[in-house]
Image: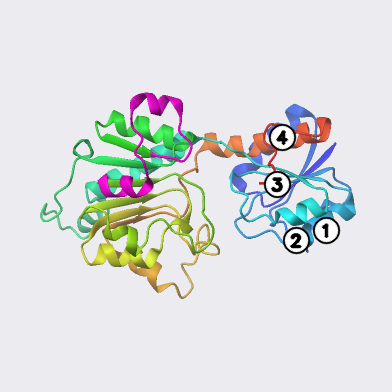
Amino acid sequence: MKLIDFGVRQDEEKYIKEWSQINNIEVKIVSELLTPETVQLAKGYDGIVAYQQLPYDEEVFDKMNEYGIHVISLRNVGVDNVPFEALKKNNIRLTNVPSYSPEAIAEYSVTGLMALLRNMKHMIRKVDQHDFRWEPDIGRELNQLTVGVAGTGRIGRAAIKIYQGFGAKVIAFDKFHNRDIENENLYVDSLDTLMKESDVITLHIPSLGKGHTVINKESISEMKDNAIIVNTARGDLIDTQDLYDAVANGKLYGAVLDVYENEVGVFNSDLSDQEFSDKLLEKIIKSPRFILTPHIAFYTTKAVKNMATISLNSMVDELKTGTSENEINLEK
């Protein structure tokens, strides 16, 4: 068995090499993304592992079929950038890593929120300039707030435990109820209700598709004054211009954004020596009421190792048995 791993970062390499040695399976490591041009490197291999934020080109799967490769395993959760029809046409199975570290993302959402509540971004900038005055940067306490958790999958449930540990009142919404949370009587009837009743709204739901936002001018108008938005899920859940306007005009207190609707080509890139063309993102970066990070909520040693190894294990299961527990149903 021979596997090829595309889009591999330096921080992933050691885990892939360790897995390869332990399992005595050859894995070719490729730093380039999986494209119609690079897929030719997979000739002679049994399966492809990949990770990228850009959409996968249909031609990639045509080439895979031509090379006799019928399994692709993603090192990430999201599959919205994969054309299912192209997979089905070429009889290619798809796996993902549904959970690499829910706690990492949940912890990060709280970290960002605490930084915003205590005005850390502005205070650090002041201290850097030798301005040690307290005012006007008085903080707020999490234990005095109602946190609305949108989405109660693995990450949402981990977040609930952390927020409860801080003493916050927690409410939740999900179309599919979790039994443990039902027993705690945390669920509200709708996402609208959650947004109206929460001081903090933290998003842990999948993308609804381009143009289908949950945080926008209409939903913001129904929120509490001085509410806070936390998004470590998907950038396209938010109309960023509407969010920025609501913070700028004082309707909302601020936001923690680890994802951004136009992040592809920006996040995880060094643009320090280039002219920055995204004016909205520039304003967010400068505002003390926004905590912005480049999609790193997942980025821990535990999560990176799990992404690397679980994807490879799923590939082996697919090749040996024709299925795996992480196979995606392409008919959904």
**Lower sequence index among marks 4 and 1:** 1
For label 3, the residue is: 331
Q: Which residues are magenta?
A: 173-199
Lateral position of residue 215 relative to residue 299, left or right: left
Q: Pointer 4: residues within 10 angstroms few (<14), some, or many (20+)?
A: many
Tell me which residue sits at (61%, 53%) in the image. 80
In whole angstroms, how far apart are the C-alphas of marks 2 and 1?
7 Å
Q: Secondary structure at mark 3?
A: loop
Instruction: Please tell me how many numbered marks the rendered image carries.
Output: 4
**Lower sequence index among marks 3 and 2:** 2
Q: Given contact means CB atoms under 8 Å apart, are the residues at marks 2 and 1 in contact?
A: yes
In whole angstroms, how far apart are the C-alphas of marks 3 and 4?
19 Å
- Residue 194 on the magenta span: yes
Amino acid type at image mark 1: Asp
| Front residue of this view, candidates 224 and 59 | 224
Circle nearer the viewer, 3 or 4: 3
Tell me which residue sits at (76%, 31%) in the image. 317
| Front residue of this view, candidates 301 and 88 | 88
Amino acid type at image mark 4: Ser
In whole angstroms, how far apart are the C-alphas of marks 4 and 2?
22 Å
Circle nearer the viewer, 4 or 2: 2
For label 1, the residue is: 62
For label 2, the residue is: 58
- Can you see residue 40? no
Circle nearer the viewer, 3 or 2: 3
**Lower sequence index among marks 3 and 1:** 1
Lateral position of residue 174 relative to residue 255, left or right: right
Circle nearer the viewer, 4 or 1: 1
In whole angstroms, how far apart are the C-alphas of marks 3 and 2?
17 Å
The part of the image, by quadrant, that contains residue 283 is bottom left
Q: Given contact means CB atoms under 8 Å apart, are the residues at marks 3 and 4 in contact?
A: no
